[in-house]
Structure formats: C-alpha cells, structure tokens
Image: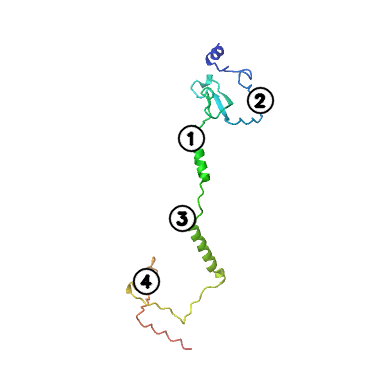
C-alpha cells in the first residue's frame, strides 16, 4: 500500500523499481555508447534534469538526466524547461565576440621604449660586459705576497678618519689580554729603530 501511495503521489515512477523501464534505464544513451552527431548550425546540446532543484523530499522524487538539442538563438521557454545548462545572454555573447575581435585586430607596433624592454636591454649589456671583463683564471693563481720593501702609507686629510680607524682596530668583542698593552702605530711619530741583530 505504501508503494502504491508513493507511486500515485510522486508522479515520477516507482520508489523501488524492479525493471529497467521503471528505473529509467531504457534511453539510448544508457544502453549504447555511440558518439552523438553534431547538433547543427544554430543548435546546441543541453542537459536537462528532472527535477531541477533538490528538496528535502528528494528520496521520493528520483532524478533523471537527459541531453537534448535546443536552439541557440532565443529558445522558447517550453524548450528550455528543466534545462540545467547555463547559457549566456545574447548581449554578453556579442560583447565577448566584439572584445576578442578588437584584441585580435589591433596591432601594437613593436617598440623597445617600455620598462620591461629597457630592463632586458640593460641586463643584456651588463652580462656582455661581465663576459668580456671576467677573469676565468683567478682560481689558478696563488695568494698575493706582500712586499716588505714597500709599506703603503695613507695621508689622512682629517683626523676623523684616523679616529674611526683606530676605534675599529681597538674594538674587541673578547678582551684576551686585559692587563696587557696594545701597541699602536702613530703615523706622526718616527718609527722605532729595529733591534740590532743578535751577535754570533
């Protein structure tokens, strides 16, 4: 009795189908797997779902899906009843086509006077200069040895440079000789005479 009541009230078939026809498995798209032909000019395929919307009584309303061919230009309301395929309006289609056509037809002249082009040209020139001036044999040479006969001296135009250099030389993170004396070189003093060589 419950099945008979649901069958009469729902209008969509059996709740517990016992055959393919009752389970909506008889359409051709369920049985065979043939590639559908082109819909033709001015027509397109669309998905139809019955019912379109889900509800809390979905258990007594079986959902059926079907693919139909409908008109592309202004289909009637009866033709798109239960249609779930989102179709853009004619105005949006015309605007999209016009925008794509203008983008394809507009030819921008090639120029190097753009920020990206200027950056690329500068990077290319810098790479070429570096490739021309790079020393590829630097790792083959040994360390430079200081010549003790030549002592480089610097003339301080101001005492500020000397003070900063002296402070940086005397600045120590860890004082390893707290009671010792740090020998400083004063550029204005005469160098102390070197000690005499030991007598043999």
Q: Nearer the viewer, mark 2 or mark 3?
A: 3
In 3D space, how far apart are the residues under numbered discs 2 and 3 (Cα atoms)? 61 Å
Is 30 rendered above or below residue 94? above
C-alpha gap between disc 3 and disc 4: 43 Å
Q: Dot 1 lies on which element?
A: helix
Lower sequence index among marks 4 and 1 = 1
- In percent of width and height, residue 65 lies at 57, 25
Q: Residue at x 52, y 61 (%)?
A: 124
1 vs 3, front mark: 1
Q: Which mark is residue 115?
A: 3
Q: Are marks 1 and 2 in contact (CB under 8 Å)?
A: no
Which numbered tag is attached to residue 182? none
Q: Residues within 10 Å of mark 2 (few under 14, many from 20)?
A: few
Q: Residue at x 54, y 14 (%)?
A: 6
Q: Which mark is residue 92?
A: 1
Q: Earlier in the sequence, mark 1 or mark 2?
A: 2
Crowd around label 1: few <14 · some 14–19 · many ≥20 (10 Å): few
Give SS at disc 2: helix
Q: CA distance from mark 4 to mark 1?
A: 74 Å
Which mark is in front, 2 or 4? 2
Name, please, the residue furthest toward the bottom.
Answer: 200
Residue 14 at x, y percent in the picture: 58, 16
Q: Upstream in the sequence, badge 2 or badge 4?
A: 2
Sequence-first disc among 1 and 3: 1
- Callout 4: helix, strand or loop? helix
Q: Write down the residue under mark 2.
A: 31
Q: Which residue is mark 4?
A: 165
Q: Residue furthest top?
A: 1
Q: Secondary structure at mark 3?
A: helix
Packing grade of label 4 (10 A; few <14, some 14-19, many >=20) is few
Give the CA distance from mark 2 to mark 4. 93 Å
């Amino acid at each position: 009795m419950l099945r008979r009541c649901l069958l009469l009230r729902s209008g969509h078939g059996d709740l517990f189908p016992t055959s393919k026809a009752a389970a909506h498995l008889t359409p051709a798209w369920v049985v065979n797997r043939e590639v559908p032909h082109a819909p033709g000019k001015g027509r397109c395929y669309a998905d139809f779902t019955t019912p379109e919307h889900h509800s809390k009584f979905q258990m007594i309303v079986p959902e059926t899906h079907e693919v139909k061919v409908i008109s592309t230009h202004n289909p009637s309301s009866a033709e798109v009843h239960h249609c779930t395929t989102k179709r853009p309006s004619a105005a949006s289609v015309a605007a999209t086509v016009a925008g794509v056509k203008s983008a394809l037809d507009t030819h921008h002249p090639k120029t190097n006077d753009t920020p990206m082009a200027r950056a690329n040209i500068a990077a290319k020139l810098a790479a070429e200069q570096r490739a021309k001036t790079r020393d590829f044999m630097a790792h083959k040479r040994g360390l430079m040895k200081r010549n003790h006969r030549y002592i480089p001296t610097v003339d301080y135009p101001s005492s500020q440079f000397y003070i900063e250099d002296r402070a940086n030389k005397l600045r120590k993170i860890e004082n390893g000789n707290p009671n010792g004396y740090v020998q400083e070189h004063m550029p204005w003093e005469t160098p102390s005479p070197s000690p005499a060589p030991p007598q043999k």
